[in-house]
């Protein structure tokens, strides 16, 4: 979720405003399906009207008013583009990506799940209103809901706004709901954060609806009635007191005359007493009556009663036969005392949990041993499905009835009558009756026991959520909200006031007429004490009290029943013990281990389970946070392997002794490095999920480092030595190209495969990071960088018959450009562009001019040649060794045999070439007239010599320019001894440097690059008078027989002497260990690579049997001495 302030800041960007406008236009053009504003869950309930408890007239009545409050939200959905330009929804509950519409660069129309934490004051109402949209005083509110019951965006929705599709649920103080975004719904704001990627926001508002209850309680009281005499009136006073919500009652207000409402007074027995509209009681006759008052106002109907007894006036001494009387009893509820306490609790959740690899019951990894980043974990907690604590108190007490009764006793007795006088005097007359009525008041008490059960403490807790903490979890904390969980339900009613629990039985009026009392003469009878009689009447007229307990309903089962009972409330039961939740209740799979986490062993886990106190608790505590015990550790170990390979270019390896332990890399040739992502890691038997498999998922990058310069495959990128080169993880093979200036020699190429979670300062382990302290798997591959020996060709033949082939004009040094190459292929076997007959050996049929079909070279004439090397062949002691051998081929090409050659020198006759007598030295002049050495080659060679081969003292004696002139004009014209007839070594004085001079990358020594390719110049000839004999022929016996002369049959004449070269490169003057072979390398034959044909056929159909290295066919029977011109300008 995002906040509004962040959006406002983002909107300040002009670029964002521009793109937003573009988005809006695109949205208006996009198809749109009309969807109205939404809400949920379900349908919003109407606010209910108030109701009265109880619904009819009562001494105390409560007005219960359902309320609803609104809170407003200002929310946002933040999205951003991924590398593939799809959109990722940040921080939401669905974990999906939104497809991008490339035509608008907007997400396609999609539903997004939003989870909102409501535990913030801004999401809770500040006022509540009833059905009539009236706001009651806040003091009347007794119960506010713990969570909203509905959410909608009806007040805010406009076409083109994000659409509230549905609200899934309110789970405590959180909710999940579905929003429609994308497509025709344009973002509210946007910004380019990593071109060409954008982020955008969808802002929307909703209303949250919360429930509450307001309560107003009123109670009416009436002054006690009691006994009145017939001539006595009494003013009764009715008062009403009010309580708002859970507060205390306020002051009492007299309502005798309505006080804004209507008051009705009524006497149950108006012949005994009447009551006025203001509560004045006027006795009428003896007896009892019940006075009822009813007050009505604002839907309240309050009523109560009192009893009135009327008695006669005190007697006057004259009985009137009106004995008897009565009265009533007024109950007073005595305060209860607590007796039995039923206490029970289960506040230990018995919580435990696990953190394991997905998928449950089929876990890929054992997290105790190791699990890589980018794998997911599940958390699973187990606990009691609820917690509770109860304390039920049995409250016992007495109702005391204060009884007031007046009984009038009729008495009669006699008194002396009037004297009767006669003459005898006066005597008492006969007795006459006398009577009176004597009232006697009685005051006594009776009691009634009562008991009921009250809630002292009631706490029930439902599972709200559970959290687990571990290094490997996202943000190190995961919250599990209950799924498929049925929380306990609780309903309770509790009232501390005894009056709410005990309703005394109403004593019916006490009425008693005693018998007339009779006395004697002048003896009025005494009035008896009828207390016990009257008390008995009161006892029999007084029922037991009605009582009710508090109410407790748990999971729709009545634990404490508040049904009305007589005298004693029914005993409650206990809340049942909880059970363990199912395994899916607190279960959260798919917790991805961040690829930013370092490897770490045995990371500790902890957890907490949250229980929320249910409403309707009594004297409850607070929400509980309790530990989850026994959660296992997790070891994060991201595996990488490195079993690298480098291609071994054996088909181009010309080394005399190849190194079988190193891959051959050939200068100016491509090579391949292979970096697989698969291979052996930890043993799968002990470390599930590891073993020998592909680990590409966990690679951040693959890298290779060359200890020498390289290019990429198409040579578009130069990579200096010791540069770590990134290789895409999913790319197995990568081709590189080896520049020619790299020094030949042994190297090790370094490889490292870096785990996605590697720190900046990582360490590495060979082959695989089985030790989790390392985040990189390293490997090295030994390689051997090797040069080339190639491009041998004959560039000139001094035989006059061949001048037209090599020179544009007779007598001119200007070359035609033709030369005779090994074959028709270049260095790597690709077509060179030359065609027959310009291929070796030079033989009959090689002359391109008509009429010279059988022409070849006469003995005594030399042929010029050159060849090239690549690599470190630019030292003073480096050279090319050429070993000539000889064969004889018959003129028809039918036979081929090796031969020894002999020649004369002065008086020395028949010196065998290669014998100890063969001392003839051979010389080569580099810059001879017909060698046509380019001046740039000489200049480049001179510059390198001056810079790198001359000593400082030598350089101080002449400038570079002077040295270059000296080499071109003097040194290059000097003769260089190259060997004898049976061997030649082409050395530094007849070598030029022809390496690349352009497109040299910065940082590369241009002189070193120029020196990296060398051209070697040479020439060779047979003696003019040369004699061939089968190899191994011993001429000594023939000489002793004087049968040996130039015409001797032992000498082979009818055919051709074939000169064959074996060519090797020598490093640092080491003739014992030649470096490269042109022909006889163990792994390849460069002569064949260049397309040498061993069985050519000439125009006359002759097949010539050849050997690799055959250069020139000399006429065995024709010598330069026989030419009509002993010296030719050529």
Image (cartoon, rainbow, N blue to C red):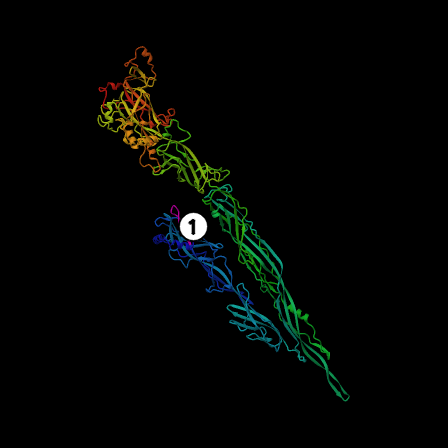
Q: Is residue 666 visible?
A: yes
- Picture coordinates of residue 393, whole percent (x, y): 60, 59
- Picture coordinates of residue 1011, whole percent (x, y): 33, 32
- In the image, residue 760 sits, relative to residue 307, either above or below, namely above
Q: Secondary structure at mark 1?
A: loop
- Picture coordinates of residue 702, whole percent (x, y): 41, 39
Q: Nearer the viewer, residue 868 or 555?
A: 868
Residue 672 lies left or right of residue 298; in this view the side is left
- In the image, residue 701 sits, relative to residue 484, either above or below, namely above
Q: Which residue in the protein does label 1 denote?
A: 90
Q: Is residue 94 in the magenta section? A: yes
Report the magenta residues as a range: 76-97
Q: Nearer the viewer, residue 839 or 294?
A: 839
Splitting the image into 4 quarters, where does residue 811 fall?
Answer: top left
Residue extending farthest to the top is 1041
Q: Is residue 389 in the magenta section? A: no
């Amino acid at each position: 979720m995002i906040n509004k302030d962040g959006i406002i800041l983002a909107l300040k960007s002009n670029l964002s405003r521009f793109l937003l406008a573009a988005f809006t236009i695109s949205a208006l053009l996009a198809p749109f399906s009309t969807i109205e504003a939404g809400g949920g869950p379900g349908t919003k309930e109407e606010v209910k009207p108030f109701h009265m408890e109880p619904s009819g007239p009562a001494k105390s009545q409560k007005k219960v008013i359902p309320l609803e409050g609104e809170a407003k939200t200002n929310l946002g959905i933040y999205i951003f583009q991924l590398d593939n330009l799809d959109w990722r929804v940040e921080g939401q509950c669905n974990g999906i990506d939104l497809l991008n519409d490339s035509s608008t660069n907007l997400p396609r129309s999609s539903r997004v799940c939003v989870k909102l934490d409501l535990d913030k004051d801004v999401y809770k109402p500040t006022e509540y209103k009833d059905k009539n949209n009236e706001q009651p005083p806040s003091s009347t509110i007794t119960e506010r809901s713990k969570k909203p019951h509905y959410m909608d965006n009806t007040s805010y929705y406009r076409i083109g706004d994000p659409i509230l599709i549905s609200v899934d649920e309110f789970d405590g103080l959180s909710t999940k709901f579905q929003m429609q975004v994308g497509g025709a719904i344009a973002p509210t704001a946007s910004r380019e954060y990593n071109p060409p990627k954008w982020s955008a926001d969808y802002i929307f508002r909703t209303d949250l609806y919360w429930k509450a209850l307001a309560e107003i309680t009123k109670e009416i009281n009436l002054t006690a009635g009691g006994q009145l005499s017939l001539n006595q009136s009494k003013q009764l006073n009715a008062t009403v007191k009010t309580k708002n919500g859970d507060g205390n009652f306020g002051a009492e207000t007299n309502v005798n005359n309505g006080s804004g409402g209507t008051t009705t007074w009524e006497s149950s027995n108006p012949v005994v007493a009447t009551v006025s509209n203001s509560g004045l009681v006027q006795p009428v006759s003896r007896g009892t009556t019940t006075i009822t008052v009813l007050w009505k106002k604002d839907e309240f109907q309050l009523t109560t009663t009192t009893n009135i007894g009327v008695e006669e006036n005190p007697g006057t001494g004259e009985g009137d036969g009106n004995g008897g009387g009565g009265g009533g009893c007024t109950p007073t509820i005595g305060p209860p005392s607590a007796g039995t306490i039923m206490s029970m609790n289960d506040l230990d959740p018995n919580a435990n949990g696990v953190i394991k690899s997905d998928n449950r019951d089929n876990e890929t990894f054992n997290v105790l041993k190791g699990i890589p980043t980018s794998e997911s974990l599940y958390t699973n907690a187990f606990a009691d499905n609820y917690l509770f604590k109860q304390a039920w108190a049995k409250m016992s007490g007495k109702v005391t009835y204060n009884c007031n009764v007046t009984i009038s006793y009729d008495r009669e007795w006699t008194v002396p009558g009037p004297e009767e006088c006669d003459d005898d005097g006066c005597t008492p007359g006969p007795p006459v009756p006398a009577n009176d009525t004597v009232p006697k008041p009685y005051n006594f008490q009776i009691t009634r026991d009562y008991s009921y059960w009250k809630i002292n403490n009631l706490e029930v807790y439902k599972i709200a959520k559970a959290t687990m903490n571990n290094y490997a979890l996202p943000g190190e904390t995961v919250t599990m909200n209950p799924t498929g969980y049925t929380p306990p339900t609780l309903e309770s009613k509790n009232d501390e006031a005894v009056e709410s629990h005990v309703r005394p039985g109403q004593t019916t009026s006490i009425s008693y007429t005693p018998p007339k009392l009779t006395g004697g003469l002048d003896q009025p009878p005494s009035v008896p004490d009828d207390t016990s009689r009257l008390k008995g009447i009161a006892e029999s007229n007084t029922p037991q009290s009605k009582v009710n307990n508090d109410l407790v309903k748990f999971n729709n089962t009545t634990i404490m029943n508040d049904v009305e009972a007589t005298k004693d409330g029914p005993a409650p039961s206990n809340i049942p013990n909880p059970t363990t939740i199912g395994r899916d209740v607190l279960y959260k799979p798919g917790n991805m281990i961040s690829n930013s986490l370092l490897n770490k062993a045995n990371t500790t886990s902890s957890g907490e389970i949250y229980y929320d106190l249910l409403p309707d608790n009594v004297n409850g505590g607070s929400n509980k946070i309790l530990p989850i015990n026994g959660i296992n550790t997790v070891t994060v170990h991201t595996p990488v392997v490195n079993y690298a390979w480098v291609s071994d270019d054996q088909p181009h390896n010309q080394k005399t002794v190849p190194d079988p332990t190193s891959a051959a890399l050939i200068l100016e040739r491509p090579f391949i490095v292979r970096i697989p992502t698969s291979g052996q890691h930890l043993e799968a038997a002990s470390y599930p999920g590891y073993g020998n498999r592909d680990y590409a998922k966990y690679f951040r990058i693959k890298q290779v480092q060359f200890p020498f310069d390289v290019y990429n495959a198409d040579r578009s990128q130069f990579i200096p030595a010791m540069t770590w080169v990134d290789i895409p993880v999913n790319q197995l093979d990568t081709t590189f190209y080896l520049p020619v200036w790299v020094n030949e020699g042994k190297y090790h190429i370094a490889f490292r495969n870096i785990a996605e979670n590697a720190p900046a300062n990582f360490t590495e382990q060979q082959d695989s990071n089985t030790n989790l302290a390392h985040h990189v798997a390293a490997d090295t591959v030994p390689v051997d960088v090797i040069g080339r020996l190639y491009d041998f060709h004959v560039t000139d033949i001094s035989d006059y018959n061949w001048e037209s082939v090599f020179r544009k004009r007779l007598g001119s040094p200007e070359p035609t450009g033709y030369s005779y190459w090994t074959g028709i292929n270049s260095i790597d076997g690709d077509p060179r562009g030359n065609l027959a007959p310009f291929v070796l050996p030079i033989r009959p049929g090689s002359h391109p001019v008509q009429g010279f079909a059988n022409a070849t070279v006469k003995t005594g004439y030399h042929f010029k040649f050159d060849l090239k090397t690549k690599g470190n062949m630019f030292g003073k002691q480096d050279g090319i060794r050429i070993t000539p051998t000889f064969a004889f081929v018959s003129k028809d090409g039918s036979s081929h045999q090796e031969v020894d050659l002999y020649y004369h020198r002065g008086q020395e006759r028949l010196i065998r070439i290669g014998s100890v007598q063969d001392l003839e030295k051979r010389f080569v002049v580099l810059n001879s007239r017909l060698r046509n050495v380019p001046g740039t080659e000489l200049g480049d060679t001179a510059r390198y010599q001056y810079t790198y081969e001359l000593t400082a003292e030598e350089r101080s004696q002449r400038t570079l320019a002077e040295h270059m002139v000296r080499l071109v004009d003097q040194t290059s014209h000097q003769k260089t001894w190259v060997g004898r007839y049976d061997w030649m070594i082409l050395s530094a004085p007849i070598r030029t440097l022809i390496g690349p001079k352009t497109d040299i990358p910065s940082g590369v020594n241009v002189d070193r690059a120029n020196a990296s390719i060398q051209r070697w110049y040479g020439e060779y000839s047979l003696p003019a008078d040369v004699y061939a004999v089968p190899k191994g022929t011993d001429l000594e016996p023939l000489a002793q027989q004087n049968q040996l002369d130039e015409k001797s049959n032992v000498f082979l004449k009818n055919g051709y002497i074939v000169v064959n070269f074996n060519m090797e490169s020598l490093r640092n003057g080491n003739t014992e260990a030649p470096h490269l072979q042109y022909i006889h390398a163990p792994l390849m034959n460069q002569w064949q690579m260049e397309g040498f044909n061993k069985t050519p056929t000439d125009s006359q159909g002759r097949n010539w049997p050849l050997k690799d290295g055959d250069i020139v066919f000399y006429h065995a029977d024709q010598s330069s001495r026989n030419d009509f011109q002993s010296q030719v300008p050529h």
